Image (cartoon, grey):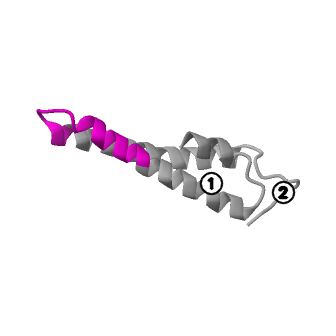
C-alpha cells in the first residue's frame, strides 16, 4: 500500500493510474489478511477483535476518500498545465 500511495503522485497517464490502483488493491487485501492472521492469535473474544479491527480499517477508507477529494477540490491541484485530463 505504501508503494501505491507513493506512486500515485507520479502518475503521468491514465493507464498508470489503473496500474497503481491495482497495486493498491493488492495492498489492501494484504492488510486485511495481516489483520486477520494477527488477531487470530487471540483466544478470548477473537470474533470481537477481528470485527473491530476490520471495521476500523474499512471506516478509515470511507472517511479518508471524501477528505482527500475535498482537499484536492480546495487546492489548486488541477490547473491548466495539468499533464492529462479524463
Q: Residue at left 45%, top 49%?
A: 28
41 lies above or below 10: above
Q: Which mark, residue 75?
A: none
Residue at x-position 72% and y-position 43%: 75
Name the residue that disc number 1 marks: 20
From the viewer's perspective, tell me whether residue 51 is left or right of residue 70. left
Q: Nearer the viewer, mark 1 or mark 2?
A: 1
Give x and y (percent) for residue 39: 25, 36
Image quadrant where one finds the C terminus: bottom right
| Residue 15 falls in image quadrant | bottom right
Q: Which secondary structure dominates the residues rendered in magenta?
A: helix
Q: CA distance from mark 1 to mark 2?
A: 17 Å
Count the marks.
2
Q: Say what secondary structure mark 1 lies in.
A: helix
Camera-nearest residue between 20 and 84: 20
Q: Residue at x 66, y 48 (%)?
A: 8
- Let me know if residue 57 is in the magenta part: no
Query: Which residue is label 2 attached to?
Result: 83
Please provide the residue range marked out in magenta. Answer: 30-48
Q: Is residue 62 visible?
A: no
Within 10 angstroms of label 1, few (less than 14), some, or many (20 or more) residues?
many
Amino acid at each position: 500500500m505504501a508503494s501505491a500511495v507513493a506512486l500515485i503522485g507520479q502518475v503521468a497517464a491514465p493507464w498508470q493510474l489503473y496500474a497503481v490502483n491495482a497495486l493498491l488493491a493488492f495492498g489492501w487485501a494484504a492488510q486485511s489478511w495481516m489483520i486477520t492472521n494477527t488477531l487470530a492469535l487471540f483466544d478470548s473474544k477473537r470474533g470481537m477483535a477481528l470485527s473491530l479491527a476490520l471495521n476500523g480499517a474499512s471506516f478509515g477508507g470511507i472517511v479518508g476518500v471524501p477528505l482527500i477529494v475535498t482537499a484536492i477540490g480546495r487546492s489548486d491541484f488541477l490547473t491548466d498545465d495539468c499533464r492529462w485530463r479524463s
